[in-house]
Image (spheres, helix red, strand yellow):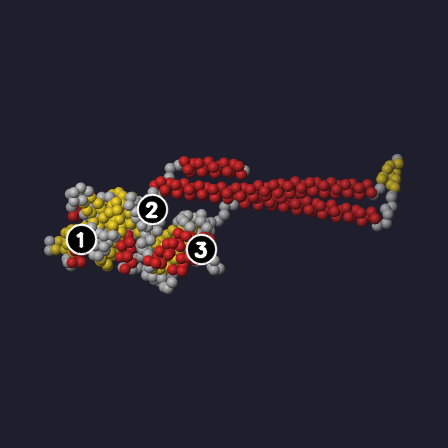
Amino acid sequence: MVGKALRFLAAALFVALAGPAAAQTSVDEAERGIVRIVVILESADGRMLYGSGSGFVVAPNLVVTNAHVVAPARQRSEFELAVVPPEGEGLIPARIIRYSPNSELALLEFTGGPNLPALTISTVEPHAGDGVVALGYPDVDYQGATGADLLRPAPASRTSGQISSLRDTAPTGEPIPSINHQAVISSGSSGGPLLDECGRVIGVNSWHVSGADTRETRGVSTRAGQLLEFLDEAGVSPTLSDERCLSFAERIETERAQTISALQTQNDELASKLETADRLTRIAVVILIGGTLALLVAVGVLGAVVLSRRRGHGDAHANGHVRVQTHHEPEPFEQPRRRLGVMTIVAGAAIAAILIVAAGVALLRAQGSQTAAIPDPPAFSGAIACTLDREASAGAQGVADMSFTASGRLCVNERTLYAPLGDDTPRFRRVIVLGEARVMDVLTIDPSTGEFRRERYPLNDEEFAAANQAVAESGVGRGCDGDPDAVARRNEALMRFTQGTPRQRLVWRCEARN
């Protein structure tokens, strides 16, 4: 039985490794959160389109764009702002709630329209040569289009390239950290996101420049660190990711490694169950054979006793028609006692044999039920949906509900292992340091109540460097196969930077989806 199971798993492993790996990308999902920003002039001649740009959703009903895109609406009252979603019925009125020409960013709030997903912002430091994707509504895509055409919902345009260089200043000379990249952008792309190949925002497209002699063009984006500072000042908490975007080859290797690990785990579990079942089967067979033999011996002895009793009543023989019976007088008290003792032994053996056989049958049934049984999954596993508890939270402006997956020893999204707190509570914790945001998040999950809590602490430069060193020394990486004790030691090393009151506290109420 074990050999067959192992051969089956080996075949499954071969198929899994030989099959093509599915491309993992969320750029398509990010497109659903891209909007066109339009500036409309109200005049005596009616409403007319004055200008347009691009933007993207960072939190429910909140959109980021470039400051210069919406500048006319701040300067003159006859200008109105609206966003045009990628799908739906049309214009959605919007208003400026934060404006920063120094960082070339603006934050708009809109009401109504479709439910647009917020994009995730990466806190990982970008590098020259990384692949990037630009989304937006460049004017080169709309040559010959009328103003009415630009007010209709339409999907965003997509271009791709690589990061050419990282700069500390913008093309205009302002001290704005920027990214020079090869993804083609033009007028109308302003305010759209620059994404990594996994669909996370790493910048905001703000300028496009060309060489004086070569005429070679470059797109220039405001870096995500500047965007996060801008949103933090506005009290907005976007969705963040501190994971490096893997290349296509790395994703294939990661998926294969995860497949191998999962199949090996299933292999070990199945082999252990089959070994236990085989052991129980052998024990049950031995018990059944022994019990059967004992029962046969008991029946044989009982039969012999019965025959001896019949013979002990006397020998009868016939003489003509007269039966003469000779009686043998037993010795006083000896023969009845011997018979009683033999009967007691035989009865005990028979009862024991019946009990042994019954035990063997019960073992066989238990073995069968154990082999067929499928263990129930933990109560806090699978797809988890969480609703933000705004009353219990502090600084929750712009924060939305969320969802994730939980598995095994509380591993979130198949990559982040949490460690039990070890304080006689069912809570689990993971402390993470977020790159350019210069913050540390303390994430705590209580599976017994379904509470997910995130507390955010700011770090100064010294604390940030020390926290990163502690993370590197911990040796704890991504994945569900890590050591919870190592995660607990890492958490303890980082918790010393959580002095005082957190800048933000978010509490979600979570439950497993059916």
Considering every residue shown, the one lying at the far left of the view is: 44
The residue wearing badge 1 is 39
The residue wearing badge 3 is 489
The residue that appears at 42% across and 50% down in the rendered structure is 475
Image location (x, y in percent) of residue 366: 57, 45
The residue that appears at 15% across and 46% down in the rendered structure is 146
Disc number lying in front (3 or 1): 3
Q: Earlier in the sequence, mark 1 or mark 2?
A: 1
Mark 1 is surrounded, within 10 Å at the Cα level, by few (under 14), some (14 to 19) or many (20 or more) other residues, namely: many
Vertical order, 397 against 358 (above or below): below
Mark 2 is surrounded, within 10 Å at the Cα level, by few (under 14), some (14 to 19) or many (20 or more) other residues, namely: many
Q: Which residue is at the front of the view, 133 or 303?
A: 133
Numbered marks: total = 3
Vertical order, 38 against 215 (above or below): below
Q: Provide the secondary structure element on which disc 2 rests.
A: loop
Mark 3 is surrounded, within 10 Å at the Cα level, by few (under 14), some (14 to 19) or many (20 or more) other residues, namely: some
The residue that appears at 24% across and 47% down in the rendered structure is 180
The residue wearing badge 2 is 245
Q: Which residue is at the front of the view, 273 or 92?
A: 273
CA distance separating discs 1 and 2: 35 Å
Amino acid at pointer 2: Cys
Disc number lying in front (1 or 2): 2
Considering every residue shown, the one lying at the far bottom of the view is: 500
CA distance separating discs 3 and 1: 54 Å
Q: Provide the secondary structure element on which disc 1 rests.
A: strand
Image location (x, y in percent) of residue 220: 23, 48
Quadrant in which the N terminus appears: top right
